[in-house]
Image (spheres, grey):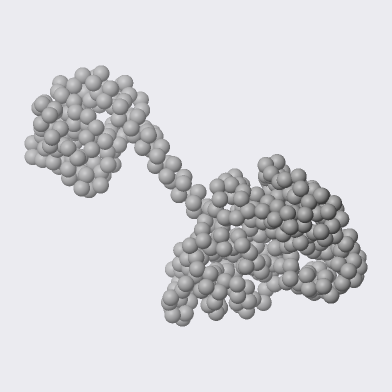
Amino acid sequence: MSDRIRVLIVDDEPPVVEGLRAVIERELPDFYVVGSASNGREAIESASALQPDVILLDVQMPGIDGIEALRTMRSQGVRAAAILVTAYERFDVARRGYGLGVRDYLVKPVGPKTVRDALEVVRVEIEAERERRAETMQEAETRTQMLRIVEGALLHLVLAGSADSPIVNDILRYLKLDSNSVLPVLLVLDQEEPRLPELVDRLRYTVHGPVGLVEPGIVLALAFDVKDDLSNYGERLRQVAAGGKQTAVDVRIGTSGPLRRALTGIRALTDSAAIVPDASLYQLRASIVRAVQTGDTDVAAQTLDDYLSAAAEYAATVPALEALLVTLSDAVGNHRGAVSDVAVQAILESPRISDPAASTESIRHRISEWIATSAESVSLSQTVRAAAEMMRSEFSSDLSIEIIAERLGVSSSHLSRLFSAELGQPPSAFLSEVRIQHAIQLLTSGEYSIKEVSARCGYRDPNYFSRAFRSATGQSPSEFAQSRRTTSAT
């Protein structure tokens, strides 16, 4: 019934009303009569109350005539298609009805075929308009979904210590956010609070920045460009979080500053290690991206397992996966621009990624399928592909850009330019990522000393290895190994 087209019949002659009703009910199954009126005043009231799709409107009626009634309806926001029924010449009526959105003029007496033909024409127009409105609503829903996913990815990238990543700048441009003034906010509620998803949505509109549930009962927000006095701002957030109920909410506000310093501010607000994920997630994510870009799905799949395991060690697993999906789809699409068509399509093709109830296995399967599909479309030159494969297979040796270039029969400068153009980073950075990733795996196993790991990953100088490892992960090799042992013990 809701898809059928609603018709309001307005005429001061009951036989005409009943005749039109009979034709519609008998011969036009896509239409149904939602009501009728016998004069202009009733027509105005009925149109406002019933919101029909079509009005069959007699022009000559006592009191307010059809034209004046339609003019009043339009001023009240009634958008129904109007078909005027008149005993006058069409030209005079058309002149008076100009600009009121009249679709057709029927001259009395009106036969069934005339009614059918007129309504069929209007039906096509109404269905096309409905389709346009549905597409507009779908586009709006898609934009909202995309915003939430990208905001979640931004929040995770900051938590993972990669606020300086190029993709963060792309995300900030897409969200129209200024990274120079960011205020970390932590809200702690009763862990049994059943309205947390609703609360997160309300806060998103209040803080104008990413908001995420990072632990049961703990909501983290990054508020951009806050102008309010902080005490007033905190009270406003408390009221929004309480939602008009007597709910205890502890609002903790950090210090405003550049986005790159937000992680320090977040750490100052909480002593929960689960909120701030291990920095190695950033390195793992970069390794997956590089593996997909070079078409090495085996490495990508293995690293994905490591990434999922690392993400599972803290509460916000879903934002970690969304950050991976945003980064991966962006990199495969065109290396830059978090809102490229490829990125948007890839993200929206995996809508269940944001479902907290989804199992890790199903998430792994979805992303693995997408990795495999994306890798098929990767277009790298034979030289770059061979160089990347050489670095992956011989990373433990004394490998350099000069050695690789000589073996491939090209100059080192040409190889460097080609590699950077196709993969967005120089060969030295790619080789360093490969080595650090293997170092993470060896340190995680706990079977090797730091000196042994350094040698097995192609670093002759353990001190240089330590500096490179800290630069990539935010921790020294010994700190990383200790954190792995602590995690395993617990």
Res 349 seen here? yes
x, y (%) of residue 70?
18, 40
Q: Foreground: 405 or 371?
A: 405
* Residue name at image x 90 percent, y 66 percent: 455
* Residue name at image x 46 percent, y 74 percent: 226
Res 196 seen here? no
Q: Foreground: 92 or 469?
A: 469
x, y (%) of residue 123?
33, 30
Q: How many marks?
A: 0
Residue 171 appears left or right of 405? left
Q: Foreground: 70 or 424?
A: 424
* Residue name at image x 35 percent, y 25 percent: 29
The quarter of the rendered structure image containing the C terminus is bottom right
Q: Is residue 77 above or below residue 167?
A: above
Name the image quarter holding residue 110: top left
* Residue name at image x 30 percent, y 36 percent: 53
Residue 102 appears left or right of 208? left
Q: Is residue 268 above or below residue 85?
A: below
The quarter of the rendered structure image containing the N terminus is top left
x, y (%) of residue 395?
85, 58
